[in-house]
Image: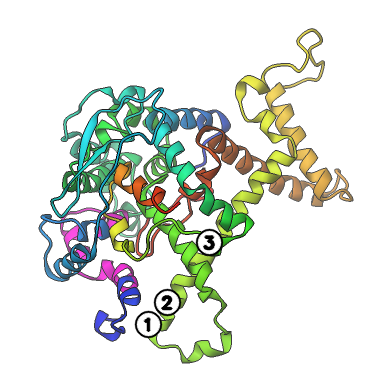
Amino acid sequence: MIPNDSEYTEFVDILHKSQGNLLRGLSRAVLPAVQALTLGGVHEQRLFDTERITVDDITKYPKGSLAFLELINEVV
Amino acid sequence: MLSLDELPNSLDVGSLARSLFSVDTGIQSSSSAAGIDPILLTCSSTQQQATPDLGQTGAGTDVSREAQNGSQYSPILNDLFFDNEETNVEPAADHSPNGNIQIASSIVADGEEAGGCHPVGIAVQSGKPTGKRTDIHQGISGQRKKLRGCETQPSVDVIGTYLIEEERKCQAWGHRTPQDTFLTPPIQQAIQNLGKGKTEVLAKILIHIGSPCLIGGLQDILESCKTQERCMAPETMNTFSRAERISLIASLSHTMSLCQLRRRYHVLQLFKDCGGPSTSTWGIAMTPSNPAHPSTKRGNPFNRSVADVTARMIQETFPDVESSTDEYTTKYRWISYLRRLGQRLHMLETRFGEGVLGLMLDQGLAGTDVGITDKM
């Protein structure tokens, strides 16, 4: 069941209170990749150092780990 | 089904196959034995494989060791990634699973509700179905029983199951648990209060948005675009080996996810182009454009402004369709759906930045059950 507009607005407020800074930090980190995928220029983009970090490694990180954000930022 | 032995000894294909078949190994039996829905555990099962000291057995142990040995962790440099004007950050130490301490801070304790510590036991309590739901399950059989492990689980089960699995990762890293950061009991309660039947959808968004599994999916899409695996010629597909076919399926999944990302991007742009942002907040929508001369139109001003955006979208998209026709009604319904989706994406973008679309893909890494659909 899809929430109505009022419920969704309240939900976004909850999201902001619970993890607003996290999402803003991650959003900044992945923005170049999102822009590349939506507007073009994919070949120059990457999120992780894929020679060091495998998919399996990524799944080990807890959500919100600064170490995970570091992985993204160090190649951006 | 395939066994891993049938696959080439390629790192990429092997890794992919492990992800794809993780539910066919000991993981499935262990989750079933624990009475936990395997669907809900799919992502965390993959994570569990890679987490040390969690009692891995059988095939899961081998995979865990391999992943562990092959992983390298960069040292964490600082804790200055956030402006933190409203952050309640407590210094913490992120430990890598291989025992190396990495200096870090939690970056999620930014909620006003995140101040207190809460007992770990809350996860187990949260994992219990409500009494009402339990009664229903005990009183039915046959076909309806099959629904128990699927989408009819109350949202509290989604949160509880997630917390149990996420705690294991947090322990391995020395990271604060979600109950102490972004999923505190007050936040859980606030989600529960949003409305019966809707909390599960919203709880999943709250849990999955920005998760490593979803951001890893973004990386998958990038790599897939670069290698252009999806451009394989159809005439060669009949001669595919099974491993090649698995790779093709994964590549097609990446393409689908990319299409969904681009679709959301354009839905959002359409909403902006049609003046939608003025309806995105209640404060703006409920304020008359000229307080001295309030509008004399009947009805809720917010609903009118929403209808105006929808009408503007239709007018610009289908200028020749008469408003009194069935075709117009059909198109109005579709455009209304796009308007609502665009509005909700815009609210997220306004709060969390333009990159937020990359934090909420419809599917994450292969073999995981993490994803955020358009039912938001």
For the N terminus of chain B, give its image quadrant. bottom left
Q: Which amino acid does label 1 sit on?
A: Ala
Marks 2/1 in contact by CB < 8 Å: the verdict is yes
Q: What residue type is labelled 3?
A: Glu
Residue B145, can we see it?
Answer: no
The percent position of residue B157, horizontal first and vertical second, equals 29, 43
Instruction: Give the labeled residue for mark 1.
Output: B243
Residue B140, placed above or below residue B301 = below
Name the foreground residue: B156 vs A53: A53
State left or right for residue B15 relative to residue B94: right
Name the foreground residue: B10 vs B40: B10
Residue B341 magenta-highlighted? no
Q: Residue at x 52, y 36 (%)?
A: A3
The percent position of residue B262, horizontal first and vertical second, equals 60, 55
Instruction: Give the labeled residue for mark 2.
Output: B247
Q: Which amino acid does label 2 sit on?
A: Ser
Which mark identifies residue A63?
A: none
State left or right for residue B121 relative to residue A15: left
Image coloring type: rainbow
Near mark 2 (Cα within 10 A), the count class, few <14, some 14-19 or many ≥20, is some
Residue B229, placed above or below residue B356 = below
Q: Which residue lies furthest to the top in this view?
A: B292
User: Which span of residues is magenta-colored?
Assistant: B16-45
Classify residue B19 by image quadrant: bottom left
Q: Residue at x 70, y 32 (%)?
A: B306
Please tell me whether mark 1 or mark 3 is closer to you in this view.
3
